[in-house]
Amino acid sequence: MPEDWQELLTRLERAFGPQHWWPADSPFEVMVGAILTQNTSWTQVERAIDQLREAGLLNAGALLEAAPETLEPLLRCTGYYRLKTRRLQAFCAFLKREGCLDRPERLGAADDLYCLRRKLLSVYGVGEETADSILLYALHRPIAVVDAYTRRLAYRLGWTDPKPSYAALQDRMEAQLPPGDIQKRQELHALIVVQGKTFCRSRPSCRECPLRRDCTYGARGGDREDLVGLRQG
DNA sequence: CTCCCGCCGC
DNA sequence: GCGGCCGGAG
């Protein structure tokens, strides 16, 4: 399959069904999750969010006022817990500066997409992927999210070099997606994550992969599971 | 042991 | 570009 992100979306949706990520959660919860999930599995993030909620700290005002020693034990299970305590509080301080401490969903309401994106990137602990996840899933802005799964999949499909830059890959996705289509962008990223966890893992399991016939990686013999027992290492 | 929806500071 | 941050699951 030549590079075609809409076709990819179609095939993944056929394989895995619609995902509807984060529809029920509050925007603030999505923002917290986006920060906590940095280099961390989502199951641990859910635990931490539950613990914050039970402690009554799942709102920006409370998080900002809380002592770091209060937050750290609750974030411990996500790893980098001291770092993430600082990042969460930095983000809440940013919400306060923007005048939406108690209305996080209104963040950047008056800003255009790229102005708001630049603001987010200026916050300590918010990089491109975190910023775009917040824009797309918490604030419902139309922007394509790139992550490690996206890079890996694009490379294995034969669409890119091994390490395309974030901006380069994002531009290529944006060039093919209907402008302003939020739902397609949300579903595409969600489905790429599912694909990345299920089949296109760092140790790929290509045998039952829905993209097997479209993928140059599998066709090149990249399926490591095929090699188990044949290699000594 | 590796891997997990990265980012910062050097 | 690279190491540090960090715990938990497989």
Image: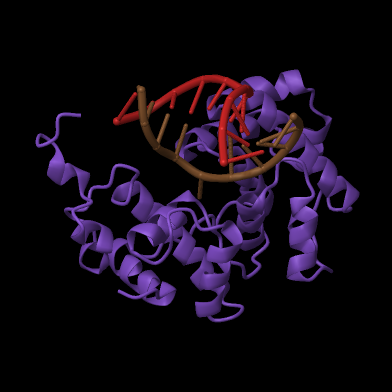
Chain colours: A purple, B brown, C red
Q: Nearer the viewer, residue A74 or A117?
A: A117
Q: Residue at x 53, y 36 (%)?
A: A45
Report whether A50 appears left or right of A224.
right
Q: Residue at x 61, y 46 (%)?
A: A34
Q: Residue at x 56, y 60 (%)?
A: A145
> In terms of image quadrants, where is residue A80?
top right
Q: How many marks?
A: 0
Q: Residue furthest bottom?
A: A178
Q: Residue furthest left?
A: A230
Q: Nearer the viewer, residue B10 or A213?
A: B10
As drawn, A193 above or below A84: below
Query: Quarter of the image containing the C terminus of chain A?
Result: top left
In the image, residue A12 lies at what x, y percent? 33, 65
In the image, residue A125 lies at what x, y percent? 71, 41
As drawn, A222 above or below A225: below
Query: Quarter of the image containing the N terminus of chain A?
Result: bottom left
Q: Is residue A96 visible?
A: yes
In the image, residue A40 lies at what x, y percent? 51, 36
Q: Nearer the viewer, residue A159 or A174?
A: A159
Q: Residue at x 65, y 53 (%)?
A: A128
Report whether A92 appears left or right of A226.
right
In the image, residue A162 lies at what x, y percent? 43, 54
> In terms of image quadrants, where is residue A112?
bottom right
As drawn, A224 above or below A156: above
Q: Is residue A177 visible?
A: no
Report whether A137 appears left or right of A232.
right
Report whether A132 appears left or right of A96.
left
